[in-house]
Amino acid sequence: MSDSTPTDAEAACFEAGIKFGSLYHQFAGTPLSPESASSLETAIGDAIENQPHCAEVTVEIQRDELEAELAGSTADYTELTGRFLEVEIVVDYEGCEVVTRMAMEDGYPLMQLESVRDAA
């Protein structure tokens, strides 16, 4: 019988996935305008950093994509979707650091594992 206890690296990766899931599903659909982009970046980062083991969150709303969306609209705002976001989340779990990133790839907001560094 094998040991089924997750390693610290596996637990850190799981924690990173939880952070991205909550980020995306909590904030998708939020009204977004060029004037609110900076404050929304800060709010998202601050909210996600509250979660356990979260060491750092960087959120960048892609202003060019936002402006392009609004150029063809009569509205002054749109809703936040993954195509407007570039995000990096760093998780530190028991000395294991995991860096994850979300960016558009082939028209889809892809969340991926960038690196895993174990202190051991």
Image: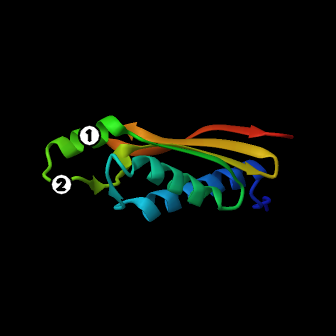
**Label drawn at residue 75:** 2
Could you say where residue 31 lies in the image, as x and y percent from the top left? Answer: 33, 59
Please identify the quadrant where the N terminus is shown.
bottom right
Q: How many marks?
A: 2
| Residue 10 vs residue 32, the one in the foreground | 32
Mark-to-mark CA distance, 1 and 2: 12 Å
Residue extending farthest to the right is 120
* Residue 112 in view, yes or no: no
Label 2: few (<14), some (14–19) or many (≥20) C-alpha neighbours in 10 Å: few
**What SS does tag 2 mark?**
loop
Q: Is residue 31 above or below residue 66?
A: below
Q: Is residue 109 above or below residue 22?
A: above
Please identify the quadrant where the C terminus is shown.
top right
Q: Is residue 38 above or below residue 117?
A: below
**Label drawn at residue 67:** 1
* Residue 90 in view, yes or no: yes
The kind of residue on which mark 2 rests is: Ala
User: Who's the residue at 43% across and 60% down the image?
Assistant: 27
Could you say where residue 56 lies in the image, as x and y percent from the top left? Answer: 65, 46
User: Who's the residue at 43% across and 40% down the image?
Assistant: 103
Q: Quadrant of residue 14?
A: bottom right
User: Who's the residue at 33% across and 46% down the image?
Assistant: 34
User: Who's the residue at 61% across and 52% down the image?
Assistant: 16
Is 18 positioned to the left or the right of 96 in the image? left
Label 1: few (<14), some (14–19) or many (≥20) C-alpha neighbours in 10 Å: few
